[in-house]
Structures are given as C-alpha cells and as structure tokens.
Image (spheres, coloured by chain):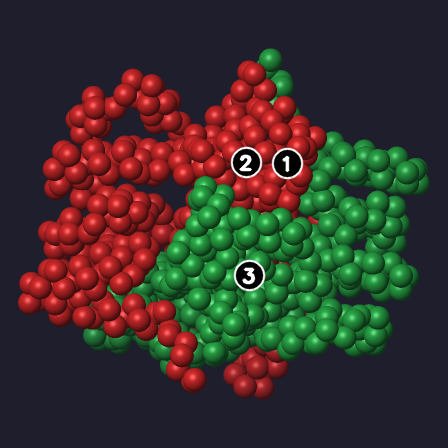
Chain colours: A green, B red
C-alpha cells in the first residue's frame, strides 16, 4: 500500500516528457490523448511548456485538437499573451465559439487585449444587449474592481421564499460565476443584502429571504483599485464580493479565485520593485526576451548609478585626507554595506507592514521611535565588536577604532530611520513605497555612510 | 445622491476614535454598543487597536462584554498571541464555552499554543471521541497541510441520490466548515470523488452522486508543506482541497480562506527574509518589542558584517597601489553599488519566479544564458556612459576610464550570474532561496566588485 499516493507533480512531469517525445515524432493524436488525461489547468500549463520547448504553431495545433468544450476551459487558463497569439491564428468561427463560451469576465480580459479590428469583427456578431454590456465593462480602468468583476451573479428578491430562491438558482445556476453567494436587490437594483446558499439550503422552505439575509454586506466600489478588493478577501475570507456603483447599485461581483490571481500579481510586482526591477509586463521570467529584461532593469540601474556621482564627489573632496590615512579606505565597504543592510531591513518591514495594513501613516512617530531604539542597540553591539577587531586584530590606533565605531553606530541609527521613513513619505506623496527598498536604500545609505564616516574621521583624526 | 456610498474605512476610523474617547471616560457599555455596529472581523481589529492604545485588561473587559455568540466569532479572528492572553485571564467556564463553539481548525490552533496544564484541563472536560480526534490533529507538524485542515466536511456515498445528498447536507450543513464541496468516500474512507453543491442544486433529484461526481480530484497529502497547499489554491482556484493520508483516506479539508492566510503569512516571511530580517515570530511590526526586533535583525547584520573582513582585507593588501592612484577610491562605491543592484535584480526575479513555480531547477542553464546576455548589454551600456563621464567630466586619464569601465562590465555580468545562480543552488541544497536576496547579494557582490576592480587596475595601470 506504500505507493498508492500518486504524486501529482511527478505525474505531470512524466506526461510532459512523453508529450515532448511524441511531438518530436509528430504523433499529434497520441499527444492529444496524453493531454486529455489531465484537467484544464494542467493542460494549459502543458501547452505553455510546449510553446516554450517548441513553438507557437505546435501549441496551436494541439489546442485545436482538443474537444471544443475542453478547449474553452483551457483557453481561459492561458495567459492573455498566449490567448491573443492563438486568436490571431485560428479561424473566425473558432474565435466566435470561444468568445461565446467564455465566462463574461474572462471574455472581457481577452477583448481588452485584442486589436480593435478583431474586436469589431467579434462585436458585429454579438446581440445588441450583450454588446452594450460588453462596452460598459470594457470602459472600466485596468486594475480596477470593475475590470475584475463579472455581471453573472444570482439576484433574489427580498420577498422570495427559500423554495422560490432555490428554484430560481436551479434555473440560472449553470450560467452564474458563483451560486454560493446570492444578492438581494431592490427595484432600483440597489444592493440591500446578501444571502449564502448555505443559509438557503439549511433553512425551512417557507422562510423569506428578507428575514434570512445579511443586510449590511461588505462591498467594493467599481473604481476601487484591485488591490483593495483582494485585501478585503484576505481580511474577511469571503468567497465573493459585490461591486457597486456610486449609487449603491450592484454592477457585478468578484470571486475569490480572481482575488487569488490579483494577490499573486500584486505581490510579484511589489517584490520586483523592491528588488529594483520596474515594469516586467506581467510576462513570466522565461518568456521575456533579453531586451525586455534589459528594459525592465537598465533605467533603475542607471538612475541609481547617477547617485554615485555624489558619493564619488564626496570621496574626491576627501582624497587628500584619505591618502594620508589610507587604512580608512579598507573600512569603507563594511560601513556602507552594514548601513545598506540596516536600512533595507527597516524599509522591508515597513513596506510589507503597510502592504498588509499593519502599519498606517498615522503610526509614523511610533515607527520612528522604535527604529531609533533598535538602531541604537544594533549599532552599539556591532560597534563594540568592531572596536575589538580593529584594536586587536587589525592593530590600528585607537583613534581609527573610535572613528569607525562611532561612525558605525550613527550610520546604523540613521539608516534605520531613513529606511523606515522613506517608504512612509513615499506613500504619503503617492509614490509606490516598494520603490524605497533594497537598491534605492543602498544608494541613499551609501551617501549617508560615507558622509558620516568622513565627518567622524575629520573630528577624531584632525584631517 | 453623491454621498450615499459610505466609505468602510472611514466608518471604521470614526468608530475607533469614538471608542478610544469612551474608554478614557470608562464608559464600557457605550463602547460595547459602538463595537456591535461592526462585523466580527472589524470588532477583532478594534480590540487589537484597543490593546495597542491602552492595555490587555481593557481589551479583555470589552471582549467579555460582547454577547456570547459574537464573542466566539471575534475570538476566532484574533491572533494566536491575543487568544492565549485572553484565555489566561478569563474563567474556566468561559474558556470551555469558547473552545466548544470554535470551529475545529481554529480550536486546534489555540490548543497548540496554550500551556500544557490548561490544555489538560480543557481535555478533561471533552468527550472521549473528540479527545482522540483532537490529539490526532495536535500531532500534525506546524506549517503542514495537517495543521491547516478541519475534519468537519460533508461526506456522501456514491449511491446517494441528489435528493438524499441534499437532505443530508441540510441536516449536517450547519456544523461543516464548507458545504459547497462535498466528498464521496468508499467504505474504507478512501476518497473516490468530489461533487460541488452547485452540481447537486442544478441536477435532477433522482440522479446518483456517483454519476455526477468528479472522480479524479486534486488532493494534498497530510504531511505536505502549507505552502504547497496554498499553491494548489492559486493554481486551480478551488474553494476547498481534500487532504488525504498515505493510504488515500480523507482525513480533512482545507478551505480557501485558510489558504489566503497562509499566502499572506508565507509572502511576508519571504519578503522579510529577502530584506535580511530573519524570524519575526509572526507578530505584527508594532507589536514586536524593540528587543524582538533586535533579535530578528542583529544576527544577519553581524554575519554579513563578517563578510566585510574579506573585503577589508582585499583593500588592505591593495593599499599601497591605492595610495599611488587615490582617485581609484572614488569609483569604488559606484562599482560596488551597481554590482549589488545588478545582483539583487537577478536574484529577486529568480526567487520570485521559483516561488510561483515559473522557474524550475531544470531551467538552470536557460536562466544563466539569459542573465549572461542581459548582464553583457546592461554592463556595456553603463560602461559606455561612464567612460564619457570619466574622460570629459572627471578629466581622468584614459587608463583610469578603461579600468573602471571594463571592471563595470565584468562586475555586472558576474553579479547577474551569481544573483540568479545562488537562489537556485540554495533551493537545490535545501536552503530557503529568499535568503540569497538583497543583503546577502550586496555582501557577495561587494567582494566580486572589489576583486574585479583591483584586478583590472593592476592590469591597466601596472600597479
């Protein structure tokens, strides 16, 4: 009984190896059969692997070989880039079938990325009512709650009985994005309550929706940023959130699976910005060309490099003194490095704390006071260790040790203060705090570190 | 109609201000009434704010003043630290009520953190069967799938009709963690399929569960890391995942709201490690004492500082040459900084890419090849800009410019290679790749940068 558990990833890896081999021999039908052993998410992942290993053509051949109903589910799981590339190759009737069968929110995502002439062609064949709705949804800003939502929700009336509600759900349930949360609207389509399918299923048939519903639901506004929407999911753990317009009319819902995608996307953006990579175009690392990578990295590197004009200038103006006491140079990397690391620690904690709403701008003074004390303790401990090292290990005079150690303490404290302050100031003035992390912090603390070091040196060594 | 939308956050802020004022005047009943205007998640957040602004006592007074049924829901939303502190203050009957009413998975989380004598006291009053189950769940490793799951799922038989299934759900639905995904087990409790409530609700009453169920469900193993579990939620967008033991028996389920918490927790850990903060004890930034912060930051700073013994040594041994051509010193920070930033960019992308399964270890050579080309282009562009600056702006001789620029190109390429290589090697040998980011990268690239620089200098300048 040992091996009864089949490792999912292992099964995936074995299948994809087999498919690669079959593709090399052009055995497309056997490839298709191998693909069909998996669910739609895995088939989509396999198609992406196939494109990466071979080319777009091979991917499209296999995509077209899938049974029609499965091909739509697979299509929905692909990245928008892959979707657009496929649409540019397949025939108009194939496009129409896919567009018709996609969930509304997935369809909008595809339409947003397609060239205008293809969109027009698709819209021509769409019934007038749908066209109006599609146009409305296409107008919502990218990354807004509106761009995430679907209009396919279940709405109930306050006066419905549980039996009537369940019958209604049975009729329209197949076409709804979710049936587990239902929305109660008044005549003006204003949202007056939500009720879960769980409540309906476990309640007596004759009870009335208005008496069972939760009448003060958490909502998001159609113009809210998608990050606010995903934050509410993390906060409340709901399966769906209603999205309302400025007059509290329900315009759509967002489901938790879409929130999961937003969380992954926003976290990746945050982490990449914290690491000094700006604008990676939502593509996966391996799918970005070398030039796209250069574009995402060079500007920031260049900008930060310019900041070293100042650091360089500081050294130049201190050159005469340095050549007198050349051993000062050997402690420069340590002071700059430790300053940078201290600042990075503080900025990382504050940026993440603000991202998960643990730190508010109003906590500014509390954070400063905490960092000042942390910096002082850390700085003194590191300085003390250094003092002994410089005296007994490096055999340098006490003045040198004092210079380095006092500089170290000041640098750590100031780096901690700047590291925590800058992300908060950035947020206040509307810049993404994530930019105030690692690389930016290193450049700023390098200036602070050198300035402090040279100041201490000129005091203690009279140079 | 302009102001009909009430901003949730604003309502929260106004309430908490009011509560603080009322608490200062010791008007506890009015405080309670103000709290009760909000849902359980917000009440929990307010209690945490109250503790931070005043003290634990005030928080507990208000917690006890809540109606019993609400107090349990609020309790479930608090952090484990707050939960344990509350339990240490309230009476035994109060503890018993809370423990009895909590969802099974929340109860296990609390029991795990309580001192053994309190757990024993609680277990004494628990029926024998429950006690056995609790003990089983307490044995699952922290951060494993087993520690996340709940045994309160709905199980159906293959031979049930839709009507029978729905009746069963109606009976037991109130006590289940979710009723939206139901699990079909054989006589040996082995998982043979899953069926969604949606399928049951929209299907005819006489159909049989075995014909409707999905019989190859995605599962996780009870010993899987919690990160693997949350990855499957992001990948498949399900509302719940079944957790099986080594013999494919269903032992529990994990729901998407718990996965959301795991994602936030794991992302925070990753980001903090990338920023050089190790082991922050799951507490919020503001709730950690200064000494806890020092403990989370000092060891890593110290370790990295030691690496600068090497950098310092390199400079010392090159001291004579440096004092000959002192202007070389002024380009040191730029080269070290740009090297660090280049390495950080690469390591950030690779660490994140591996975390979201976009980059596999088998992509090693592909990644290296990509980074080498990116590094070469970025390095040459930055070097070219520097060349002109050094010649025309700094008026240094061509040999100096050549030294700096060739060093720059080599440093950027090598930093990109190391930056992408180290996280992958770390993963291979079982170290968290996130540790190979910012601060660690800065220390390593500082050594690379200085070594390369001095090597170039001794070639070009014959020193």
State the residue lying farthest toward the top. A1
| Mark 3 surroundings: few (<14), some (14-19) or many (≥20) residues within 10 A | many
State the residue lying farthest toward the right. A26
Where is residue B222 shown, x and y percent of the image? 49, 28
The numbered mark 2 sits on a residue in which chain? Answer: B
Q: Which residue is mark 3?
A: A155
The CA distance from mark 1 to mark 3 is: 23 Å
Q: Which mark is residue B166?
A: 2
State the residue lying farthest toward the left. B25
The one of B274 and B264 positioned closer to us in this rendering: B264
* Secondary structure of the residue carrying numbered label 2: helix
> Residue at point 13% right, 41% down?
B90
> Residue at point 69% right, 67% down?
A108
Q: Which residue is mark 1?
A: B205
Relative placement, left or right, of A367 versus B213 is: left
Whether residue B106 is visible here, answered yes or no, is yes
Whether residue A278 is visible here, answered yes or no, is no
State the residue lying farthest toward the front. A206
> Residue at point 49% right, 69% down?
A186
Where is residue B448 shown, x and y percent of the image? 52, 55
Placement of B127 over or under A69, stated as above or below: above
Q: Quadrant of residue B7?
A: bottom left
The numbered mark 1 sits on a residue in which chain? Answer: B
The one of B61 and A388 positioned closer to us in this rendering: B61
Q: Quadrant of residue B101?
A: top left
- Tally the numbered discs: 3
Where is residue A338 shown, x and y percent of the image? 35, 59
Which of pointers 2 and 1 lies earlier in the amino acid sequence? 2
Placement of B348 over or under A422, stated as above or below: above
Relative placement, left or right, of A250 versus A427 is: right
Is disc 2 on the same chain as disc 3? no
| Mark 2 surroundings: few (<14), some (14-19) or many (≥20) residues within 10 A | some
């Amino acid at each position: 009984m040992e091996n009864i558990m089949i490792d999912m990833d292992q099964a995936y890896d074995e299948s994809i190896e087999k498919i690669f081999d079959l593709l090399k021999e052009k055995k497309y039908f056997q490839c298709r059969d191998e693909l069909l052993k998996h669910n739609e998410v895995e088939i989509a992942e396999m198609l992406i692997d196939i494109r990466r290993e071979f080319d777009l053509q091979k991917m499209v051949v296999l995509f077209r070989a899938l049974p029609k109903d499965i091909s739509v589910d697979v299509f929905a799981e692909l990245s928008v880039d892959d979707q657009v590339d496929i649409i540019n190759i397949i025939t108009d009737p194939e496009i129409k079938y896919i567009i018709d069968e996609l969930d509304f929110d997935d369809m909008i995502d595809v339409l947003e990325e397609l060239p205008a002439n293809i969109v027009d062609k698709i819209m021509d064949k769409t019934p007038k009512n749908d066209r109006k709705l599609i146009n409305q949804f296409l107008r919502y800003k990218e990354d807004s709650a509106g761009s995430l939502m679907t209009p396919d929700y279940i709405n109930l009336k306050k006066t419905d009985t549980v039996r009537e509600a369940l019958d209604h759900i049975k009729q329209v349930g197949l076409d709804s994005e979710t049936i587990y949360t239902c929305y109660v609207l008044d005549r003006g389509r204003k949202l007056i309550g939500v009720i879960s399918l769980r409540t309906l299923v476990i309640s007596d048939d004759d009870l009335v929706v208005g008496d069972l519903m939760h009448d003060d639901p958490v909502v998001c506004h159609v113009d809210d940023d998608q990050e606010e929407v995903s934050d509410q999911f993390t906060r409340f753990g709901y399966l769906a959130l209603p999205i309302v317009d400025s007059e509290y009319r329900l315009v759509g819902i967002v489901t938790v699976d879409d929130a999961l995608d937003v969380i992954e996307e926003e976290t990746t953006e945050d982490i990449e910005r914290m690491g000094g990579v700006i604008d990676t175009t939502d593509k996966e690392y391996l799918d970005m060309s070398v030039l796209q990578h250069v574009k995402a990295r060079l500007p920031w590197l260049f900008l930060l490099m310019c900041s070293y004009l100042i650091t360089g200038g500081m050294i130049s103006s201190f050159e005469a003194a340095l050549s007198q006491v050349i051993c000062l140079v050997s402690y420069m990397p340590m002071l700059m490095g430790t300053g940078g690391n201290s600042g990075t620690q503080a900025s990382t904690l504050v940026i993440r704390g603000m991202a998960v709403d643990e730190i508010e701008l109003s906590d500014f003074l509390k954070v400063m006071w905490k960092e000042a004390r942390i910096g002082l303790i850390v700085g003194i401990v590191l300085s003390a260790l250094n003092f002994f090292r410089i005296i007994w290990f490096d055999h340098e005079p006490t003045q040198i040790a004092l210079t380095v150690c006092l500089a170290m303490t000041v640098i750590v404290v100031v780096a901690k203060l700047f590291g925590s302050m800058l992300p908060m100031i950035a947020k206040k003035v509307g810049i993404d705090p994530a930019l105030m992390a690692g690389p930016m912090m290193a450049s700023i603390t390098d200036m602070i570190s050198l300035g402090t070091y040279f100041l201490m040196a000129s005091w203690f060594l009279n140079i």
